[in-house]
């Protein structure tokens, strides 16, 4: 009964909602143009899974940078609920601080809303300087800040002059844009304008790279760095999992940018190419095949036979360690089906890993992906900004004559671009099978309904969906927090993922949901006979 799955989901909506939601759903048909509507306003009251601009800016991109203090300017809720809930792990560097375990907030009260909150923000900065003495402070605005007109940019400038530190304010009020995505963009702009290009760290190797859009959830970034270092790469910076401000400031000196999460960081990747000449390569370190392919593409980029040979040696070593466990997991999971609904990149990345385990994806969607994440970057010129996204600042950069350095000649670049995804991302849809479903901004009702119709064996989503789905009898693994497990990236991560899925799917409790007295007679005996 998969023929009419989206029609059956849509049938309960009134005409207006039906028309809107229909455009956010697609059944894959490779013979037709595959266009989807995305990055538009969520329908009020529909129980979207989305978050806000502040979450995308503070929670996702800036929050993981470990050696700076990030002050949430607003009432206490925003900072409190985003305190320690995203598992972007960080370890302090020798002699350096790690502030990621703290929540700094100005905790605005009624008088601050009435008379303005900048005084309180200044006092918070003074206190932070006294107690923590960081070299960088960042400020993230929440909803009321924009409405009452607090000039946080002026406060930041003043703090820089007073303390001789770097202080950057972000106007990432929650109502901007339509989702977390606006916050990614605002954070990218701020990092590009104020941080990247200012550092003095000098990479020692010509195989110097940055990993962009990797937030070290459950140690994913560490597993990638382990593999890359083993091959011989120098990781100059990671944006931003376990990130250090000085390394991010020096990232323009690296020779290649790797882009893991395209949605959250493509702006910086593009701007670094224009301003500093650093090429970017789309990678995917989720799944064995994704990891191997990404490593081979990197070796092709640097074009050194010794590096390519070392890459193959490391791949062989790592595979030897994990392939038995992967095969065992595949034997148990083969033939199952999955649905994936995650933020803006994982719904694509994990499909490959699931396939390696014999699990077929029947539905996938993003909370806040744009059309290019679904359909590929070539549609970018056709995407029109709507009224909801027009208030997000678009910045343009120019070539920095002094710091510009291109690793490849134009000729080498052109040759390679035909072979590896240099500045290219094909999106999720192309990797999906005919007949499967893509749903953008899936809501709670739709998740329930699709589950009823498509009956996937497992549903990968977030904390808000997890228990509703499991109450309905379907395994739900969280692909934001990894259910407090991980890493899931790289070779070792693939095995960890496989083990977690097996543990979840084969949990004996699934067979104990129906009490025995509903399936068996509780009294046994005969009537009227001896
Ligand atoms: S929507 Fe506004 S109030 Fe809610 S978390 Fe985001 S910034 Fe805070």
Image (cartoon, grey):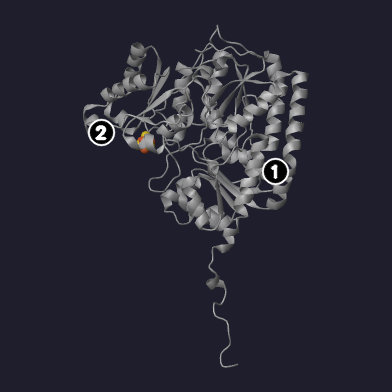
Q: Residues within 10 Å of mark 1 (few under 14, many from 20)?
A: many
Q: Looking at mark 1, is its residue's CB closer than 8 Å to ligand 1?
A: no
Let me know if residue 151 appears in the view: no
Residue furthest toward the top? 402
Query: Residue 176, image x and y in percent?
Result: 39, 32
Quarter the N terminus occupies = bottom right
Question: As rendered, which of 338 and 388 lies closer to the eye?
Answer: 338
**Which circle marks residue 14 in the picture?**
none
Q: Nearer the viewer, mark 2 or mark 1?
A: 2
Question: As rendered, which of 272 and 495 lies closer to the eye?
Answer: 495
Question: Which secondary structure, mark 2?
Answer: loop
Number of marks in picture: 2
Quarter the C terminus occupies = bottom right
Q: Residues within 10 Å of mark 2 (few under 14, many from 20)?
A: some
Quarter of the rendered structure image containing ligand 1: top left
Q: Quadrant of residue 36?
A: top right
Let me know if residue 113 appears in the view: yes
Mark found first going from the N terminus, 2 or 1: 2
State yes or no: discs 2 and 1 in contact (Cβ < 8 Å): no
Q: Quadrant of residue 35?
A: top right
Q: Quadrant of residue 497?
A: top right
Query: Residue 285, image x and y in percent?
Result: 64, 33
Q: CA distance from mark 2 to mark 1?
A: 53 Å
Question: Which secondary structure, mark 1?
Answer: helix
Residue furthest toward the front? 95
Q: Residue at x 45, y 25 (%)?
A: 187
Residue at label 2?
A: 109
Residue at label 1?
A: 356
Question: As rendered, which of 282 and 82 lies closer to the eye?
Answer: 82
Query: Residue 119, image x and y in percent?
Result: 26, 23
């Amino acid at each position: 009964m998969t023929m009419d799955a989206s029609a059956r989901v849509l049938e309960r909506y009134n005409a207006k909602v039906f028309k809107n939601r229909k455009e956010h759903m697609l059944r894959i048909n490779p013979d037709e143009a595959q266009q989807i509507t995305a990055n538009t306003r969520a329908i009020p009251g529909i129980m979207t899974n989305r978050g806000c601009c502040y979450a995308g800016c503070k929670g996702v991109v800036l929050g993981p940078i470990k050696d700076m203090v990030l002050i949430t300017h607003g009432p206490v809720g925003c900072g409190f609920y985003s305190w320690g809930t995203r598992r972007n792990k960080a370890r302090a560097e020798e002699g350096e601080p790690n502030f990621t375990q703290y929540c700094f907030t100005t905790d605005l009260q009624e008088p601050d809303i009435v008379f303005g909150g900048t005084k309180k923000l200044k006092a918070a900065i003074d206190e932070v300087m006294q107690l923590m003495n960081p070299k960088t402070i960042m400020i993230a605005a929440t909803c009321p800040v924009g409405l009452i007109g607090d000039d946080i940019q002026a406060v930041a400038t003043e703090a820089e002059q007073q303390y001789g530190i770097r202080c950057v304010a972000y106007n990432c009020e929650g109502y901007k844009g339509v989702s977390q995505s606006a916050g990614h963009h605002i954070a990218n702009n701020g990092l590009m304008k104020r941080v990247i290009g200012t550092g003095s760290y000098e990479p020692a190797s010509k195989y110097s790279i940055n990993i962009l859009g990797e937030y070290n959830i459950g140690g994913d970034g560490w597993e990638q760095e382990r593999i890359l270092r083993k091959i011989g790469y120098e990781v100059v910076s990671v944006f931003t999992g376990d990130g250090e401000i000085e390394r991010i400031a020096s990232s323009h000196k690296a020779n290649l940018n790797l882009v893991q999460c395209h949605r959250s960081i493509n702006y910086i990747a593009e701007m670094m190419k224009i301003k500093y000449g650093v090429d970017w390569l789309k990678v995917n370190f989720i799944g064995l095949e994704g990891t191997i392919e990404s490593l081979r593409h990197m070796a092709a980029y640097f074009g050194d036979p010794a590096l390519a040979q070392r890459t193959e040696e490391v791949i062989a070593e790592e595979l030897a360690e994990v392939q038995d466990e992967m095969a065992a997991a595949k034997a148990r999971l083969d033939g199952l089906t999955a649905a994936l609904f995650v933020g803006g990149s994982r719904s694509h990345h994990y499909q490959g890993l699931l396939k390696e385990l014999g699990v077929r994806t029947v539905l996938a969607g993003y909370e806040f992906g744009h059309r290019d994440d679904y359909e590929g970057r070539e549609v970018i010129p056709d995407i029109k900004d709507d009224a909801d996204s027009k208030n997000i600042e678009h910045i343009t950069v120019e070539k920095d004559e002094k710091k510009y350095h291109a690793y490849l000649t134009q000729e080498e670049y052109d040759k390679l671009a035909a072979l590896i995804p240099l500045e290219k991302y094909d999106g999720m849809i192309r990797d999906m099978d005919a007949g499967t479903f893509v749903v953008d901004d899936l809501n709670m009702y739709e998740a329930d309904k699709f589950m009823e119709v498509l009956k996937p064996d497992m549903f990968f989503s977030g904390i808000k969906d997890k228990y509703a789905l499991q109450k309905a009898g379907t395994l739900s693994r969280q692909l934001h927090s990894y259910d407090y497990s991980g890493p899931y990236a790289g070779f070792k991560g693939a095995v960890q993922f496989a083990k977690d899925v097996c543990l979840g799917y084969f949990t004996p409790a699934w067979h104990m949901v129906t009490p025995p007295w509903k399936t068996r007679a509780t009294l046994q005996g005969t009537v009227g006979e001896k």
